[in-house]
Image (cartoon, rainbow, N blue to C red):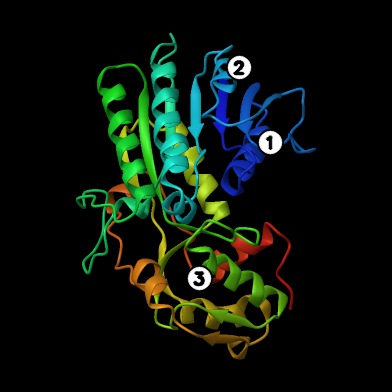
Amino acid sequence: MRILVTGAAGFIGSALLKSLIGDPAVPEIVAVDLAERPAWAAAGRVRWLCGGVDDCAVMDAIFRDEFDLVFHLSSVPGALAEKDPRLGRRVNLDASLDLLERLAATSRCPRVVYASSIAVYSPSSGPVSSRTPPRPAITYGAHKRMVEIALADHTRRGEMTGISVRLPGVVARPGPATGFGSAFMSELLHALAAGEPYCCPVSPGATMWWLSIVAAVKNLMHAGVIAHCGTIQLPALHLTVEDVVEAFAEVGGTVRTSLVQYRPDERIEATFGRFPELDVADERALGFTDDGSVAKLIRNALTQANEIAG
């Protein structure tokens, strides 16, 4: 089996790539990212391509090989794509469509796992599921939805078997997580872990969908091996900021609620702090999971970085 991972040096991509490298059943991986090859990405099993998927020369180098399984994670993050829509279109839309076209022209009918986003939804007061009509409120979400449609069409044509995985807020991104509007979710956890004060841009009762990097990678790997095609919404814990702050006492052994001050920014809270419940019964039946509890979410998010301290 030959596997392609785009965005391989990113937060999610690097964690996924480490899991793949740790699997002796995976003989060959092609990894693509703007960053240089990290030391842990052993040259013997990983062919590393330094460059962007929007670069034709890089795309030509990728397709020296054909692939059985593809994890397409490369993207310009939402806040940056909104600020620079031309860059967002070039990477998030045009390069993604080109990648799918190239995969469709190969002989292997690859399994394609596409990292989509909850940005495809508009603000909602009711439960949200993969069947909720997508109405993106930002350019990033619009491009993600367009690629979902293209992947579904290539699958319909029998050129690949595709699954679009809508990712919620994945924590804890290393700071500073520039370009991500939901960066405060990770910043909060890092500050609490370090015992440092934090000024939160949303209110204590702001609700988000939380998923650790550990659970995100587990779900992406699962998406790569099941037969299901289409679009799925990953399960996530529906928690307030206050839920997470209070749970830190159970994980870190110290009450740290006094470290957090709240200065809500209406724009940020309206976009990232009013999420309703998720309806993911179908996804759970397929074997997708969340972290199970807020304490486990925190442990999974921060143990990865060895940050939990008493």
Q: Are marks 2 and 3 in contact (CB under 8 Å)?
A: no
Q: Amino acid at mark 3?
A: Val
Give percent across and percent down for residue 308.
Answer: 70, 70
Q: Secondary structure at mark 3?
A: helix
Considering only order in the chain, which callout, 1 or 3, is on the residue closer to the N terminus? 1
Pointer 3 residue? 294
Residue to which mark 1 is pinned = 22
Q: Which residue is mark 2?
A: 61
Report helix, strand or loop for mark 1: loop
Left or right of 42? Residue 190 is: left
Q: Quadrant of the N terminus?
A: top right
Instruction: Identify the residue at image location x=63%, y=39%.
Output: 19
Q: Residues within 10 Å of mark 1 (few under 14, many from 20)?
A: few
* Disc 2 crowd, CA 10 A, few/some/many (<14, 14-19, 20+): few
Q: Give x and y (percent) for residue 172.
A: 59, 61
Q: Which residue appears at 63% of the width and 75% of the height?
A: 251
User: Which image quarter: residue 114?
Assistant: top left
Give whichever of discs 2 and 1 has the lower sequence position: 1
Judge by depth and name the residue closer to the eye, 120 or 43: 120
Q: CA distance from mark 2 to mark 1?
A: 25 Å
